Image (cartoon, rainbow, N blue to C red):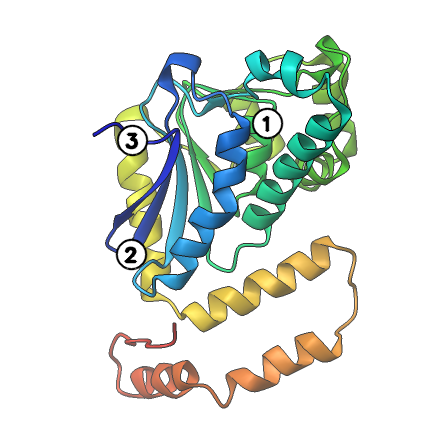
Amino acid sequence: MTKPAIYLEKDGSIGWLVLNQPAKRNALSKVMWDAIPGLLDDALRDGAIRSVVIRGVDAAAFAAGADISEFESTHADPAKSKAYNRAVHDASRRLMRFEKPVIAMIQGPCVGGGCGIALAADMRLADASAKFAIPPAKLGLVYNLQDTKLLVDAVGPSKAKDILFTGRLVRADEALAMGLIDRLVAADALEAEVRALCATIAEGSQFTHRASKQIVRQILDGVAEDTDETLALFDSAFRGEDYREGTRAFMEKRKAKFTWR
């Protein structure tokens, strides 16, 4: 049975969000953008899934940008163009604010919209084949504010401008040095490294992960002082089941078995 252009594969505590358009190096179509929020909702509902990993269907590419073949028909009509742009925005925002940890596993080209998806993840792990570019300057287009902010948050404003002004390819070693990726791993060890990271995440408190994501996102959104919401998160932890289990496990010198979903 042929799998769709993007799908969620459940594998123990990992939800693999697989980009599956290999003939186009996983270029992102509107169908794929539209599908992302629903697939993430499925991963959120499944209590067994502790983290989501975005990856290409094979090692040849993560995502070589948007599917340009759609542009002539889509963007010729203002209503269709607006719907397409909204789908891209909503998919990226859902990834960026998804309640569970999201990891991008990057091999091969990670360009344009593909780079936006990777930036929306919490962490990015790549091998030496990874190549990054954001090429709107070569197409007369504009990278949207949401994705541009993710880029600036990752690498800082001057490096972001370098990437945006030149549209050049950034290879994996430079991407690591500038903060575009978090870990550079040998190709034959990348999936194992990702699985090990996900296993560590799965052992931790899911309540803590979710609260930490909310607080970090508020900081990135410009919040600099505690709010009623952040104070409530901090306070509620002391009445939670994971806190009780965590402190008991610490006192009993054993590994905690957290149950919060």
Q: Nearer the N terminus, badge 3 or badge 1?
A: 3
Spatial CA distance of label 2 from label 3 is 21 Å
Q: Amino acid at mark 1?
A: Gly
Q: CA distance from mark 1 to mark 2?
A: 27 Å
Name the side, left or right, on which 30 lies relative to 256. right
Is residue 228 shown left or right of residue 235? right
Q: Residue at x 64, y 82 (%)?
A: 232
Q: Is 204 or 41 nearer to us in this picture? A: 41
Q: Tag on residue 6?
A: none
Please name which of the two marks, 3 or 1, marks the residue nearer to the observer: 3
Residue 113 disc label? 1
Pointer 2 local density, CA inside 10 Å: few below 14, some 14–19, many at least 20: some
Q: Residues within 10 Å of mark 1 (few under 14, many from 20)?
A: many
Q: Earlier in the sequence, mark 2 or mark 3?
A: 3
Q: Nearer the viewer, residue 178 or 194?
A: 194
Picture coordinates of residue 194 (x, y %)? 34, 42
Q: Residue at x 77, y 16 (%)?
A: 165
Numbered badge on residue 13: 2
Query: Rounded to the nearest whole Å, what is the CA distance between mark 3 and mark 1?
Result: 22 Å
Using the rendered image of the protein, determine whether residue 127 is visible from the camera's viewpoint: yes
> Horizontal and vertical percent for residue 255?
26, 74
Amino acid type, residue under disc 2 in the picture: Ser
What amino acid type is highlighted by mark number 3? Lys
User: Tag on residue 3?
Assistant: 3
Residue 55 location, quadrant = top left
* Mark 1: secondary structure: helix
The location of residue 180, given as percent across then percent down, is: 58, 32
CB atoms of marks 3 and 1 within 8 Å: no
